[in-house]
Amino acid sequence: MQFVSAFAVYFVIWWITLFAILPIGMKTQAEAEEVVPGSIESAPAHFRGGRVVLWTTLVSGLIFGGWYAASTWFGLGMDSLPNIVPKFD
């Protein structure tokens, strides 16, 4: 696999994982009872972007590693999905 292809797959996995991890541990301003005038109550009270980026990188690295092992060592790819996923008639 070429480096550019692997990086593209990792980037897509990282971006999807970001949106999955982003709401974990978030506390809204309404829950913290610290609503800033002029903002919506559901806005984050204390956004910790570094923590989100770190967890996203770690989790997406594990997912990418699993995908890379499945595609390299086991020969699984997108063409193998019809054989893995059962058909429902």
Image (tube, rainbow, N blue to C red):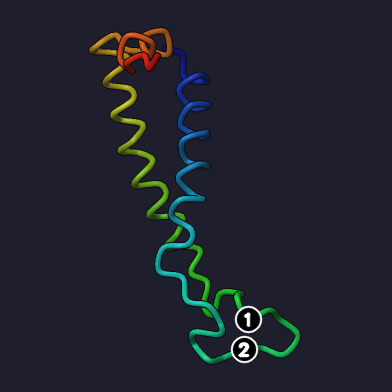
Judging by the rendered image, the residue that carries numbered circle 2 is: 35
Q: Quadrant of residue 69?
A: top left
Q: Residue at x 47, y 19 (%)?
A: 3
Side (left or right) of 42 relative to 7: right
Residue 65 at what x, y percent from top left?
30, 30
Indicate whether 52 appears above or below 7.
below
Residue 39 vs residue 64, the one in the foreground:
39
Side (left or right) of 79 relative to 74: right
Which label was assigned to residue 41? 1
Q: Quadrant of the N terminus?
A: top left
Residue 83 at what x, y percent from top left?
32, 9
Which label was assigned to residue 66? none
Indicate whether 20 appears above or below 39.
above
The kind of residue tagged 2 is: Val
Q: Which residue is drawn at 45% across and 45% down?
A: 17
The kind of residue tagged 1 is: Glu
Q: Which residue is drawn at 52% across and 42% down?
A: 15
